[in-house]
Structure formats: structure tokens, C-alpha cells
Image (cartoon, helix red, strand yellow):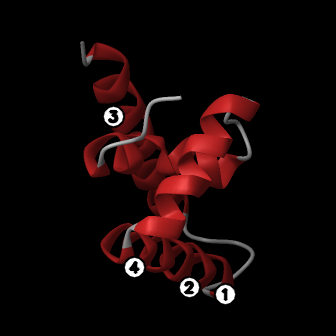
């Protein structure tokens, strides 16, 4: 099994948080998480951000939702375009 680099880890965070990683990728992700303090901190920051967004209210302003959707779409498109 090949190990994830930190860059690959960051690219997979969104899928990890969405519960969309295939089992083999999830295993590699978890192994990297166990070994890398920087990536654990990155994941924690992402989870904190998501909790804060959820806590901000059940009914965010339409512009906020569209902005977040555009940001996530842009990130997903960037990931797909990577070799």
C-alpha cells in the first residue's frame, strides 16, 4: 500500500468529511492522519470551520450558501483537473 503525501491528504479532506472516500483511500487517509501532526491540525481546522458554519444558523443568507457552494465546486473542479 502506498502512503499519502500531505498534499494528497489535503486534496481528500472534502471527500473524507463528506464520507465519500472509498474504503482503501479511507484506510490510507487514516494512516496518514495517525502519523502527521500537521494534517491532524488541518483536519481539525476544517471540522471547526464546518461546526462554526452550522452553528451560525440553520438558515444562512442565500448569498452565503451560494458562495460556499461555489467555493466547494471550485475546489472539487481543481481536484479533478490535477494529474
> In this figure, which residue is indicated by the disc labeled 3?
74
* Label 4 – label 3 distance at C-alpha: 23 Å
Q: Residues within 10 Å of mark 1 (few under 14, many from 20)?
A: few
Sequence-earlier tag: 2 or 3? 2
Q: Which mark is residue 25?
A: none
Pointers 2 and 4 in contact (C-beta within 8 Å): no
Q: Residue 4's spot in the image, x, y percent?
A: 40, 41
Q: Is residue 20 visible?
A: yes
Residue ID for mark 1: 55
The residue under label 2 is 52
What residue is pinned by disc 4?
41
Name the element at disc 1.
helix
Mark 1–mark 3 Cα distance, whole angstroms, equals 24 Å
Residue 81 lies in what quarter of the image?
A: top left
Q: Earlier in the sequence, mark 2 or mark 4?
A: 4
Residue occupying image coordinates x 61% and y 55%: 30
Q: Identify which residue is drawn at 37% across, 67% down.
A: 39
In the rendered view, tell whether residue 40 sits above or below residue 29: below
Among numbered discs 1 and 3, the one appearing first in the sequence: 1
Look at 74% across and 46% down and name the residue there.
19
Q: Secondary structure at mark 4?
A: helix
Give the CA distance from mark 2 to mark 3: 21 Å
Q: CA distance from mark 1 to mark 2?
A: 5 Å
Amino acid at each position: 500500500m502506498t502512503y499519502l503525501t500531505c498534499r494528497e491528504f489535503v486534496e481528500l479532506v472534502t471527500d473524507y468529511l463528506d464520507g465519500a472516500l472509498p474504503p482503501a483511500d479511507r484506510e490510507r487517509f487514516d494512516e496518514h492522519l495517525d502519523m502527521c501532526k500537521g494534517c491532524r491540525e488541518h483536519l481539525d481546522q476544517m471540522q471547526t470551520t464546518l461546526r462554526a458554519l452550522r452553528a451560525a444558523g440553520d438558515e444562512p443568507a442565500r448569498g452565503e450558501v451560494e458562495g460556499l457552494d461555489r467555493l466547494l465546486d471550485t475546489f472539487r473542479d481543481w481536484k479533478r483537473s490535477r494529474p
